[in-house]
Image (spheres, rainbow, N blue to C red):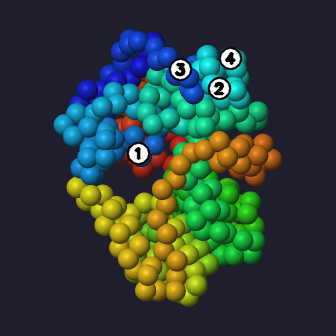
Amino acid sequence: MRAVVRDRYGSPDVLRLEEIGRPVAGDDEVLVRVRAAAVNSADCKLMRGEPSLVRLMGYGVFKPKQRILGRDFAGRVEAVGRNVGNFRPGDEVFGETAGGAFAEYVSVREGALGPKPENLTFEQAAAVPLAGSTALQGLRDRGGVRPGQRVLVNGASGGVGTFAVQIAKALGAEVTGVCSARNAELVRSLGADRVVDYATEDFTRSGRRYDLVLDVAGSRSLRALRSVLDPGGTLVLCSGEGGRRIGPMGHIVGALALSLFVGQSLRPLAAKTTAESLAALKELVESGKVVPAVDRTYPLSEAPEAMRYLEEEHARAKIVITV
């Protein structure tokens, strides 16, 4: 099969298209013929091996253990392991893998796979799993959003943010989205009740207060984010500040420590795509309450350009590779 591989950490220049062996589905796995794969900021970090802490977490200290990047995908089932009971060859599916989606085939655990929403193309479906699950779990599970609550999404025009705006509205919240002026119309079209241009307005000094802040951008301090929360409000951290060594870990540890002494709930999020989250997202998508926003698509051979665009051009919504 064709796959985009790398043998060292670095810029998009380390990526190249090669013919390699096709994976085989294990007993509890499903082999999928990939039709589309999404590009995530996590792929960029793994490509560069930054922050350095990532390398110590099993990804390879001096060189990457996983040659193929790519987590989100959509495609058709090619084969199933002997313990798999929910899928069969020919099924259209979407899901997430720990790596390997920038290829013509990927083998994935059955529990991280779901039936593709019928009203989406493969390109649209590939944009959903990781970003959609992060937004869903941040708002519903960690944030406990209820109808009528005021929610602020910092980083509303990115991959996670575009899903968060729509999911918060579907859960009955009043939504404020923070983004750049060029993306304001996109965020407004997704259902945001109010849009803040971060270049001209500091949302932490507006005097407005929120029941929940979902911080996707990771661009503000804990003190600044807490200042816009109601006394009993909740801050969910999907990202955070940090350097090349430990990344957002300092931000996360600080939030956990501070939460012991304040009335507000400060909750880091470690999202995980599951069969349940995929089923919930499928229902939201098929009901029309959530529509994946795709900025650009690239063919598999141009995966380095897709990664470069995401890193350098501050892409709105999702970038998708077609296979």
Quickly name the residue at label 1. Answer: 42
The answer for how far apart the CA atoms under marks 1 and 3 are is 25 Å
Given the image, on which type of amino acid does mark 3 rest?
Ala
Quickly name the residue at label 2. Answer: 84
The answer for how far apart the CA atoms under marks 4 and 1 are is 30 Å
Instruction: Indicate which disc residue 63 carries.
Output: none
- Residue 206 makes an appearance in the image: no
Residues under numbered marks 4 and 1 in contact, where contact means CB atoms less than 8 Å apart: no
Q: Residue at x 74, y 75 (%)?
A: 148
Residues under numbered marks 1 and 3 in contact, where contact means CB atoms less than 8 Å apart: no
Q: Give the mark, 2 or 1, whose residue is nearer the N terminus.
A: 1
- Quadrant (top left/top right/bottom left/bottom right) for the N terminus: top left
* Side of 115 where 296 appears, left or right: left
Q: Residue at x 61, y 32 (%)?
A: 110
Q: Residues within 10 Å of mark 3 (few under 14, many from 20)?
A: some
Quickly name the residue at label 4. Answer: 89
| Residue 223 to residue 11: above or below | below
**Tag 3's secondary structure?**
loop
Residue 24 rendering spot, x and y as whole percentages: 49, 17
Q: Give the mark, 2 or 4, whose residue is nearer the N terminus.
A: 2
The answer for how far apart the CA atoms under marks 2 and 4 are is 11 Å
Q: How many marks?
A: 4
**Tag 1's secondary structure?**
helix
* Side of 13 where 188 appears, left or right: right
Given the image, on which type of amino acid does mark 2 rest?
Val
Q: Give the mark, 4 or 3, whose residue is nearer the N terminus.
A: 3
In the image, farthest residue toward the left: 62
Q: Give the mark, 1 or 3, whose residue is nearer the N terminus.
A: 3
Given the image, on which type of amino acid does mark 1 rest?
Ala
Q: Nearer the viewer, mark 4 or mark 1?
A: 4
Given the image, on which type of amino acid does mark 4 rest?
Pro
Instruction: Indicate which disc residue 25 carries.
Output: 3
